[in-house]
Image (cartoon, grey):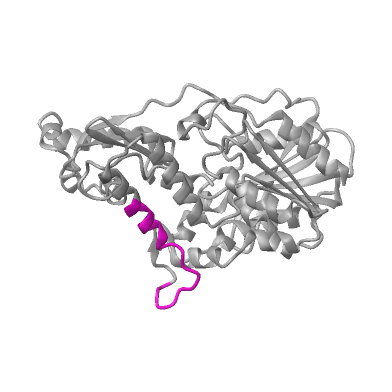
Amino acid sequence: MKKIILLFVALLISFASFSQGILNLLGRSQDLFKLFSEDKFTDAYGYFDPTFQAKVTETNMKELWAKLGEKLGKMESADVINSKTEGDFYTVVVEVKFTNDTQNFLLAFNKAEKIVGLFLQPKSSANYTLPAYADTTLYKEKEIYVKTAKHNLVGMLTSPKKGTGFPLVVLVHGSGPQDMDETFGPNKPLKDLALGLAAKGIASIRYVKRTKVYPGDFSGPFTVKEEVMDDALAALTLARTIPEANKKQLYLFGHSLGGMLAPRMALLTPDLNGIILAAAPARTLTDIIVEQNKYMFSLAKDTSMAGKKMLDSVVKELDKTRITKLGTMKADSALLGLPAAYWADLNSYNQVETAKKLKQRILIVQGGYDFQVSVTDYNLWNTALGKKKNATLKLYPDLNHMLSPQKEKGTIQQYEVPASVSSMLVDDITAWIKAK
């Protein structure tokens, strides 16, 4: 659950001294870049404090944006990825995607909610490195395409170099726009898993998520069917055509939102041998986001009454997403950036009760240092499935949401440090699959 969840993780770290809500401020941050992209520089310039305007003219700003356009191309999207209090200021990091590259901008707001600083953040010098267990002599990769009626998603078949009749796993991302590796900073958890499993004799299919390649399809009402399920099921259909794979040994690995939806997809694919749920919510998405905000608020150590009121207001805003029916609400009505139809559909689905009905094998894994989906969810899964013969559950105390070993629970900044998916986790998944 990255993009969608990380947006809400960023909602709250002590915002008590500001006059209006965080949601409005984050929206203004995105609106600024929308105005830039539409050449509405006079309107955009009005977002800035006079102290900033005294140093940077509207013409200067227009020229800077033009130079960025020459280098990076046309702006495609702007997403808030982080925010926090810095003394008397509130900073917001906006990830802006252009046709040629991505650039992060840091905005600093004063108490009047005017921008007093605009900075281009340097790109991280850290690069992705292959995990130690990715023995390049043992696996091969081939570009493939996951196809549905109106979409064509590039993907990768990663398989053992030798032998046939190997098990095959379809890897399903968390929420939001994702590439095939589920890249965040220098980390690529789905790639790590694919390479590690292939080196141990298990093939996998991973693919670019539809929300990344076809963002225009998600401007109106949609649900997790369009966001996740249709393409995951299409990848399973593709898996059945791989000549070297054992068609009786097909698995689905779901990370975060993908894990939450894995039981739902397993009901639709009775020939699936098993599902693997990694950092999968057992509660509603709203519950998860509320818990994240409370966690981030606790890190801010704000004990003021104003801070508590701000937390209460954010929770109240989040509670609006708990709908299970549209009623008089339009399907495309926006609730915290997602259509009402999305919330109603997801809230009507009970992943735990669905999993209890499954006959397929189930493996549930969870990290103890995961601040996005917590041990609370693991305990709920364990209570419901712990005694079922077809279910295996394991808690890894030192793993975070990216499934990598850490020394503390941490925040989003942890994801900017290179860390491979746990070798123990790769070994355990391998052993579980091969146990049949």
Percent x, y for residue 105?
A: 33, 34
Q: Which residues are magenta?
A: 312-330
In this rendered view, identify the residue nearer to me: 21 or 75. 21
The answer to whether 178 appears left or right of 98 in the picture is right
* Position of 200 relative to 175 (above/below): above
Percent x, y for residue 287?
A: 49, 54
In this rendered view, identify the residue nearer to me: 68 or 392. 392
* Position of 290 relative to 83 (above/below): below
In this rendered view, identify the residue nearer to me: 150 or 131. 131
Q: Is residue 405 magenta?
A: no
Q: Quadrant of residue 109?
A: top left
Residue drawn at x 47%, y 48% as measured from the top left: 291
Percent x, y for residue 242?
A: 81, 49
Residue 95 visible at all: no
Residue drawn at x 44%, y 77% as measured from the top left: 327
In this rendered view, identify the residue nearer to me: 2 or 56. 2
Q: How many marks?
A: 0
Percent x, y for residue 278?
A: 66, 44
Residue drawn at x 89%, y 37% as measured from the top left: 163
